[in-house]
Amino acid sequence: MRYASPTNAALILGLALTLTACGACATSGTSAADDALPVQQSTEYTTGRATPDGTGKYYMGREISLVMGHLGAGWLERETREREERTDLLLDFLFRQEGSTVADIGVGTGYFALPWAQRLTEGRVLGVDIQPEMLEILTARATASGLTNVVPIRGEIDDPGLPPGEVDVVLIVDAYHEFSHPREMMEGIVRGLRPGGRVVLVEYRGEDPFVPIKELHKMTERQAIMELGAAGLEWVQTENFLPQQHVLVFEKPAGP
């Protein structure tokens, strides 16, 4: 489970009383990222002590978390998810993104991919996952919904398997922090994007102690910008219309 235990959550909330509420939270157009970023760390992987829920593998100073497997599919489809995360607002944001070929990396059960495919009547959604069980669920749900524009792709831990230069928008929801090879995965995503293509990265706010999610399943805005910037993506904006998560938008440069 990604949620912190009630005891830990209470401790977090207690500590949070000493902080200015959401002092580190960004607002659309202006954010903590406007301040000087830390000196970029090496993109080489390092190993160290594994903390609870962590792998002991570190990237740019961040410990990579353990993966939530296909047995957690029910958590992705829980009835309370829309109310807790306002996923309806995220879908509205996605529907406004222009593009006919879009990709959902770590697609899981297709929670976002299927309604996105319904809206893209003349486009297609590439659903990428490394777990065949998740792709089986995705395919079954797409078939049951009568959708023919959902394309399942079995990715690798170091390659999403996207068609080079064809993708307009890539969505990554609460999955990037679990990538065992984030550098290689982002290189593959950048290869798959057309020039000017965008990445929409959604992660629980690591700056916000009120978010009751395990620490390794969160990311700060600064860390996300540093890591995706190392892959050659340019940060465009951070949206904070969701109650618990950042929505960061990046772009592949159109030219040299």
Image (cartoon, helix red, strand yellow):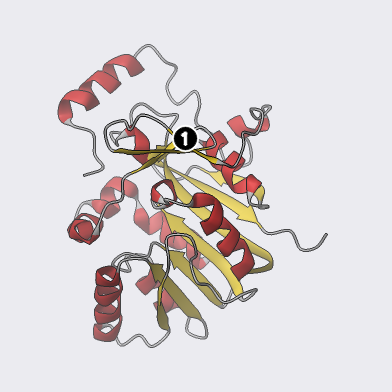
Task: Say left or right for 123 vs 55.
Answer: right
Query: Looking at the picture, does residue 7 appear above or below residue 213?
Result: above
Task: Say left or right for 213 vs 251.
Answer: left
Of helix, strand and loop, which one carries label 1?
Answer: strand
Residue 10 falls in image quadrant = top left
* Quadrant showing the N terminus: top left
The residue drawn where x is 26% and y is 76% is 136
The residue drawn where x is 62% and y is 53% is 250
Residue furthest out toward the front: 47
The residue drawn where x is 65% and y is 34% is 40
> How many labels were placed on the picture?
1
| In the foreground, 198 or 128 | 128
The picture places residue 223, in percent across and down from the top left corner, at 54, 36
* Quadrant showing the C terminus: bottom right
* Residue 78 visible in the current orientation: no
Q: Amino acid at mark 1?
A: Arg
The picture places residue 12, in percent across and down from the top left corner, at 29, 22
Residue furthest out toward the top: 18
The picture places residue 252, in percent across and down from the top left corner, at 68, 59
Task: Say left or right for 254 vs 118.
Answer: right
* Residue 53 visible in the current orientation: yes
Residue 48 falls in image quadrant = top left
| In the foreground, 238 or 5 | 5
Q: Which residue is mark 1?
A: 62
Q: Residues within 10 Å of mark 1 (few under 14, many from 20)?
A: some
Task: Say left or right for 82 vs 61.
Answer: left
Residue 218 falls in image quadrant = top left
The residue drawn where x is 63% and y is 27% is 38
Query: Looking at the picture, does residue 187 appear above or below residue 222?
Result: below
The picture places residue 101, in percent across and down from the top left corner, at 55, 76
